[in-house]
Amino acid sequence: MSMEARPVYYRELDLLGFDKFFDYPRDETYPIMWAENNNYYYKGEKIAKTQGGSLFTQPELIVLNKSDQVQRKLELVDVPAMLSKNAGLLENLTQETIKKVFNYYKKYKRKVDVFYVAFSGGKDSIVAADIVAKALPSDSFFILFGDTQMEFSDTYTLVNYMEREYERKGVRFYRAKSTLSPDESWRCFGPPSTAIRWCCSVHKTSPQINLIRKIIKKDSFTGMAFTGVRAEESLKRSMYDDLSEGKKHQGQYSCHTILDWNSIEVYLYIYANSLPLNNAYKKGSSRAGCLVCPNSTGKHEYIKRMVYKDEVDKFLEIIRETSGKKYDANEMRQFIDNGYWRTRKSGRELKVGKDKFEIQDDNGSLLIKAYLPELNWMEWAKTLGAINKISSDQYKVSFKSNEFAVMVNQLPKTTLFKLPMKDNTKDFIKFKSLFRSVIIKSIYCRRCGICEAECKLHCIDMSGSVKISELCVHCFKCHDIRDHCMLYSSVKNKNVEGKSMSGLDRYFTFGTREEWVDTFLNYEGGKDFWLSDGDGIIQNKKKDAFVHFLRDAEMVEYKRNIDGDKYTRNIPTEFTEKIIRVKNDANILWGLILANIVYTPTFRWVIERLDLNRAYTPDEIKDMLAVDMENDTKGLGRRNVADALKIMFVKTPLGTSQVLGMVDADVRITASGNEMIKLKSFARTSWPNPNDIVILYSLYKFAEACDGMYQFSLETLLDDSIEREGISPTRIFGLDRETMVPILNGLSANYPAFISATFTLNLDQITLRSEHKSQDVLELL
C-alpha cells in the first residue's frame, strides 16, 4: 500500500454491501481491514474495490476472487500485535516530533504572542494536539476549534469530549465560529464551488483571527498555529516545510507538527495512546470535514449522505433553491448528483439578479453607477483618507499627499459617482482602483468578518454596522480581498470586473534567460545541473526564480519524497524530455514554452493586459501593474515584475525572435563587467514564423483548460471577449484568421489523427481528437 491507508470498521462494510459476501464481527473495538482509496485489503490481500458512487448513487462493490462457497469469515485487525511490532518505530517518531515542537516553541517564544493548536476534530489534529500537550507547558498554548457550523454531528461529539479532557488538564479550549450561520451564508454568497471557496475564509480563517485578538487582548499579534497538516495528503502539502510563514495571513506562523507522518503512523499513535477517534471514520468517512464540500467527490459523498442524511439534505436543498438553472425535479437531482453545482465560476449560475453597479472609464475619469437610491459609501471611504464635504454633491478625499474630487449624484433609483480626471499619475490610478473597491464593499458588505480579520491594527469593527476607526493608517489591506469583497466575488455576474491577479511576482527581479534554459536542457534537467548552479551562471536567488519558471513552464515537477534538496527534487517532466529534441530550434522551443507559461499569472497578465501592436514603456507597465497589485503599497512588487519581464523580453526568444513580441532595448557591459539592460519599450506582435506543431499543442492546451472542449469554430478562437479558462493560440501568438486558416488546413492534412478543420460556405469547424492529449502532440516533434 503506497497511498493514504485508513482503517475500515464494520459499519462502512455494511453500508457498501460487504455483508453479502463476508461474515465479520459487528465490533468497533478495532477495524476489520484497511482501505487505500477505493481498494480494500484484508491481511495484505486485496479482496475488493469500489467503483463510482455519488450523493444519490451507491458505489459498485467489486469482490475479487469471489467463489460460490459460503461467506468468507473475517476477523478484527490484531491492533495490539501491530503496536507491539512497531513500538520502537512509533516511540522514536513520537520523541522526535515532541522535540521538534519544543524546539520551535523555545526558538520563537520571544517572537510570537500566542501559540495554539488548530483543531478540526479529525485524526491528524487529534494527534497534533496530543503531541503539543506533551511537549509544552499546559498554560503556554491553547486549543482552537474552527467551528464551521457545518461539521458532522460525530465531530461535535468528539470536540465536546476533547474540550472536557483538555480543560481537565489545564489547557484552555476555544471555539471560533462566524457570526453568519451556514444557512445565511449559503443563501447570501451562493453555494461554494471549487473556484469560489468563500466558505473557508468566512467560516474558518477569519473567525479564528478575530477570536484570538479577543483572547489575548491584542489587535496586532503574531501567532504560531500547530497544525495536523501532512505531506502525504496532497502534492501541494508535500512541498510544505515544517515551519511556514504567512500562507494565509502575513506575519503568522504554521508549525506542521506531523508533516512527515504517514496515515498508518497517525492511526497507530491514536491506538497506542488510547485517544478517541471521530466516529465519522468508523462510519466510512475518509476525513472529518464539512457535510457538503465542493472538493469532495465520489463514494464518500454517498457515505456522508447515508450517514448524515438530514444534515446533508439541508444543504442540497439550498443548492436547489439558489440555482439559476431552469430544471425540473429530476434534472436538478441529476445536476446535483453529477456535481455540476460545484463548478460555477460566477454568480451567473445563481438566482441573484444582475450586478448592482456598472463602471466606465471616461477618458481617464472614473464613472460608477450604483443601482441603489442610497449608499453609505463614506464609512468605507475612510480607509482611503480623510473626507471633506465641499457641497451637497461634491467631496474631497485625502489620499497620500493628494486630494481627489468625488462627485455624487443621487437619483430616485441609482447613485452616480464620478472621479474627474486630474493628472494620470500613479496615485490617481491607485485611487480609482481603491475607490471602486469602496463602492463594491458599500454595496455588498454583509459583515462576514474577512476584512476585519485582514486589518492587522483592528481598525474595522463589524460587531454592529461597519465602523472604521479614526486610527486607520490607510494600509489598504482590507481592499486586498478577492474582487475587493468575497461576497461580490461569489455572486458577480461578470468574470472580469475587478479581476485581480495574484502571484505575479514569481521571478523576483531576475526573470529567466535563454542561456539558463539551454544549459538546463544540455544537462537534460538532471541533478548535476542544480549541483553545478547551472555551470555557475544561476546562483542563489536566481536559482529560486528559475525553479519557479521551470515549474510554470511544466518543465519540472517537485518530488518531495526523493533524496535531495529543494532544487534537486525538481525532476524533469515528460514535456522536458520531449522538447530536448528541438532544443536547437529556438522558434519551436520557446513557442512550446510560451504555450505553457501563459497559464501562469505573470504571462497571463502580459497576454490579457497588453494590447497587440502597441509599444509600452517600463513606466506604463508598472502603472498598469498597480491596478492588479493593489496591496503593493511600496511598489517593490511592481518593480520586480517589470524587471523580470524586461530580462525575459530582452534575453530570450520571446522578444529577440518575436515569439511573443518586439523589444526595443539597449544592452551594454560596464567597465566592471556587469551587464546593463535598459528597456525602452515592448510591443506584443504577431508571431512572424508560427510553427504548426506549436499551434496544435496550444490548441490541445486550450481545449483541456476549457474542460475538454475539443470542438469549436475559428470564430470562437478569435473571440477574446468570451470568458473561459483556456487561452486561444490566436491570442497567445497574435494570429488572425488569414494566418490561421492555412495553418489549420495544413494540420488537418498532415495530422488527421489529431485534428480536422473545415472551412466551407462561411462555416468553419475545428475538431480535435479527444483520445489524444497535449502531451501526445509532442511525439510529432
Image (cartoon, rainbow, N blue to C red):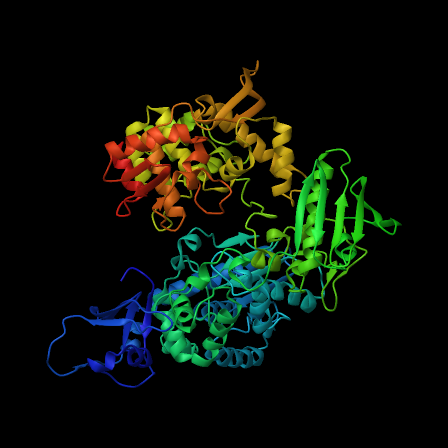
Depth check: give the residue in front, 364 or 22.
364
Q: Is residue 74 above or below residue 587?
A: below
In-image side of 255 versus 466 (left or right): left
Q: Residue furthest top?
A: 671
Figure quadrant of residue 532: top left
Q: Residue at x 37, y 36 (%)?
A: 762
Quadrant holding the N terminus: bottom left
Q: Left or right: 693 with respect to 248?
A: left
Q: Percent position (x, y) of residue 245? A: 56, 52
In the current view of this chain or complex, which residue is farthest to the left? Answer: 68
> Going by the image, does 463 lie left or right of 544?
right
Pick the front one: 497 or 720: 720
Q: Nearer the viewer, residue 596 or 83?
A: 596
Q: How many marks?
A: 0
In the image, residue 658 above or below residue 164: above
Q: Can you give x and y, in whole percent of width and height, for residue 54 in the image?
A: 35, 69
Q: Residue furthest front?
A: 761
Q: Residue at x 45, y 38 (%)?
A: 598
- 39 left or right, relative to 374: left
Q: Quadrant of the C terminus?
A: top left
Residue at x-position 45% and y-position 63%:
341
Q: Residue at x 49, y 33 (%)?
A: 542
Residue 521 visible in the current orientation = no
Tell me: residue 719, above or below residue 450. Answer: above
Residue 489 x, y percent position in the rendering: 58, 56
Q: Between residues 186 and 278, which one lies in front from this camera angle?
A: 186
Q: Is residue 778 visible?
A: yes
* Residue closest to the far bottom: 26
Instruction: Give the image quarter of residue 465.
Output: bottom right
Residue 306, image x, y percentages: 38, 78
